[in-house]
Image (tube, coloured by chain):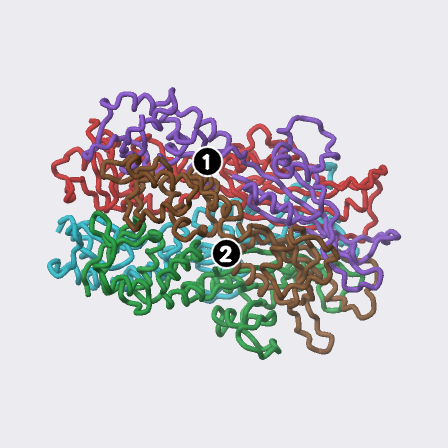
Chain colours: A green, B brown, C purple, D cyan, E red
Amino acid sequence: MTEVIELNVGGVHYTTVLDTLLQEKSSHLHELFSNLDALVKDNKGRYFLDRDGVLFRYILDYLRDKQLSLPEGFREKQRLQREAEYFKLSGMLECLRNGGDMRAPGCITIGYRGSFQFGKDGLADVKFRKLSRILVCGRVALCREIFSDTLNESRDPDHGGPDRYTSRFFLKHCFIEQAFDMLHERGFRMAGSCGSGTAGSVAEPKPGVDTEENRWNHYNEFVFVRE
Amino acid sequence: MTEVIELNVGGVHYTTVLDTLLQEKSSHLHELFSNLDALVKDNKGRYFLDRDGVLFRYILDYLRDKQLSLPEGFREKQRLQREAEYFKLSGMLECLRNGGDMRAPGCITIGYRGSFQFGKDGLADVKFRKLSRILVCGRVALCREIFSDTLNESRDPDHGGPDRYTSRFFLKHCFIEQAFDMLHERGFRMAGSCGSGTAGSVAEPKPGVDTEENRWNHYNEFVFVRE
Amino acid sequence: MTEVIELNVGGVHYTTVLDTLLQEKSSHLHELFSNLDALVKDNKGRYFLDRDGVLFRYILDYLRDKQLSLPEGFREKQRLQREAEYFKLSGMLECLRNGGDMRAPGCITIGYRGSFQFGKDGLADVKFRKLSRILVCGRVALCREIFSDTLNESRDPDHGGPDRYTSRFFLKHCFIEQAFDMLHERGFRMAGSCGSGTAGSVAEPKPGVDTEENRWNHYNEFVFVRE
Amino acid sequence: MTEVIELNVGGVHYTTVLDTLLQEKSSHLHELFSNLDALVKDNKGRYFLDRDGVLFRYILDYLRDKQLSLPEGFREKQRLQREAEYFKLSGMLECLRNGGDMRAPGCITIGYRGSFQFGKDGLADVKFRKLSRILVCGRVALCREIFSDTLNESRDPDHGGPDRYTSRFFLKHCFIEQAFDMLHERGFRMAGSCGSGTAGSVAEPKPGVDTEENRWNHYNEFVFVRE
Amino acid sequence: MTEVIELNVGGVHYTTVLDTLLQEKSSHLHELFSNLDALVKDNKGRYFLDRDGVLFRYILDYLRDKQLSLPEGFREKQRLQREAEYFKLSGMLECLRNGGDMRAPGCITIGYRGSFQFGKDGLADVKFRKLSRILVCGRVALCREIFSDTLNESRDPDHGGPDRYTSRFFLKHCFIEQAFDMLHERGFRMAGSCGSGTAGSVAEPKPGVDTEENRWNHYNEFVFVRE
């Protein structure tokens, strides 16, 4: 079964072993390579398949490891799906429908209401970004996968399933770059960012509210996507 | 008709069967390969075509399945069109004009007027993003394709055809990340994002309006594109 | 003249016909291939050129069709120019200087001053995006190419040539997604987007001005680029 | 040990020397190539490995130099990790976990509170961007790597380890483009940008505050990512 | 010296002439190919180098023209540098350190303070974008390279060297799309964009200031990068 097989897939040449091609019992590949004599050969004696040669790379990789791992940002998923359908690779089709590399695609929005600290106590130059809560919005299961135990779900009153969407999760810490790092580690990329400031008000500021800090209030929102 | 054919297209080698090359009756390829003896061969005996070798991959894929499926974000559409014209593949040209993979290209803008909930009832820290309506703008047919039954068309007074543009559709739910997910699933990518806050006002806020909530009003707009 | 020619360009193999290589009378290629016997050959008998093998793909494509069509977002223009200079392909150099695919590169900015409609007549929830004019800024010739008869030039008082820049064109319709679609169809991509809201004012709003609508005034600006 | 070895890795051909393949004592490759006679060969006599052919390029590069250097924005890290696991290359796996090219991935946010200078002294047109401090937020070790001695850490009261996050670092200079240049030189790319203006205030401006300058206050925030 | 040389670089085949490989006297390549008999050959008689095959394309291109021209946005600079170090190509290393294609990498920020013209004289609908100055910030030498004689340096009081940074340059014209076009022509790409509006003010507007125009004041900032 470790017989080396030379393939010509639409003009691209691959080499593998028979065992790999017979991995999926119900596939068209298994059907084809169970009867080697019936297969068409090219003029160099390679077994010939009249399909796209480039995409066959991922077909073979799937058969070798029984898991599907595609390049980040892979741009031929739809095309690959057609090939998997042709070869009747049901397990691979299942993987493809689930996002290819087992990591579900989706969006998560990170938002924060921020301002700046103004020195009340003589520290005249303490003007760093100040934020008290990092908001997390998106599909519940996805938010949990990324932020796990740094996620505070206490304020989401909706007790539906993990496929529901929420806009009431927030993080237990206040380091927005840490949140960004966790999203990047798990394959998310920033797709957009919006900022807006607050409106002024005729009302006199309440006692205890720093006027300057109040003026610098803003809301920044960052959309992350995993494809 | 399953005769294996070795091709040399401008120096790139493909392998296919005669049947595939004869698929489109009215094409230049059908004309050429109906008379194999008249074809020029390279020095290895491969049938030779003096055209771009790389793009022929998609020509062959089209002939095999009679549908055109290009990589997401394919960057040689214009070049491929020239090849399809040369080979007189009218069906393929039709597909190319329709966006290549049957999915019409286009833009959809998602916008929302948002604020934050401020605790009126002692819940002093209830400050999550609050939005009451997700706006959908774009070509009517495209909006329908993406959002189907989650789309509320009730406020679009214009009863024109599906090729008209609208800015009065909105969604039946208020989870903006769900809208983003639906757009991504269907091949859209976020191309830009804009945020703006509201202006203050000399007018005293009306009774029942929360002053703080009012100050945080903003409009965020996200532009999505499918190429 | 349809003699099949095997080429080895820096190690990449191409196949073409002599006729193609002799297309441009004044080129270095014409000079070289007018005297086949003087050409160096590799050990397989292919005519050898000591130049970049990958870029020669576009040299050949140009010679076949006498027009230059590069992939969208092609990243080796500068490198290709060097090859065209080496081969003394003056027509191709001309095309390259004009942007490669005859479509001039450039920027167009689309802006709109928007707000939201607030119900004056009991339609309390009529709060859709409201805009009354889509501004178009950029080089006059480029704006005309994209928007042609949907472009209103009536307010541009400058009667200079088409290479001048304008910021006083606008569209005859008010569907911003339609403008985006037209830009995308013609090879533009959104490169940036900015939003800003208006400032409040001490002045009492003028009679007839809706206070709420006034507060939501914003200016969103989208920059598009064709490379 | 400088014996030239021809490899067929899943159909892609590589050439190397035995010495390179035996570099890592504990690897599966060492095990395989210590016993050449037991290896499977293809029909041209090349040693055959039933693994992904394209990714083996980086396996070989690692073995040659004992360091891992991947393309910027490499999109097959997860796939490469699988190959490294298969070949039991522990050193390479270690490198991959550390970001591939020894440069840790991560986010850094650069923010500034800016305004414009308005002429108090008759210089009526002095209206350039004015900023007094460039804020740096992110993981401490990363901020230090990028900005080293241009970084002012004096206001970070937290004396934890370098893996903690900070939002209280700032730069010793006020040229934001210089900060951008330093980030780009070290492989960071801008992923998002947010702007917001300040709110007006009922309070009379304090003496010494320029009213116009005050009105133009804004906060711009730029997120950089290294993948 | 025009002897055709077949190379096998890590499995990728190149063809060149001896003359090209001997171009740089002090290089390791010159050392190797000065003594052809001592070189290892693969089983087809090609001279073998145990280095990355793909990157050797740029090594060869450099040797042919004695200048380095990389694809725009080339993502393997660090990897290429390793190869150049291995081959001891000092001139090429110098070029790589200078950004590869002689165009220094860097950032330039373009900003403008804008508003809209409101009709004072009955031209009720004159509401186009209005800006009176385009600001240019970045390294002085870079700003000069891009904008040359359209750059106004009169307000930069700092008379340091061209490597200093400035935020006080502006353009002699007011067409921001023209500035964008000039940046794109020279290889810059927009990396980010920020918008912010101004705050309202308790102060009565000064005589001669149009209230409406004043309310629409905003600052838009665009960051451009050349890699």
Image-based side of D122 in relation to E138, left or right: right
Tell me the amino acid under the disc marked 1.
Answer: Ser
Above or below residue A157? Residue D90 is above
Image-based side of A117 in relation to A64, left or right: right
For mark 1, give the secondary structure. Answer: loop
Q: For the point 38% across and 20% down, which residue is it?
A: C26
Q: For the point 61% across and 72% down, which residue is it?
A: A168
Residue sitting nearer the eye, B219 or B63: B63
Determine which quarter of the picture holds residue D52.
bottom left
User: Residue C81: percent from the left, percent from the top?
Assistant: 41, 31
Residue identifier under label 1:
C69
Q: Disc 2 is attached to a residue of which chain?
A: D
For the residues bearing labels 1 and 2, Cβ distance under 8 angstroms: no
Tell me the amino acid under the disc marked 2.
Answer: Ile
User: Residue A81: percent from the left, percent from the top?
Assistant: 41, 60
Image-based side of E164 in relation to C131, left or right: left
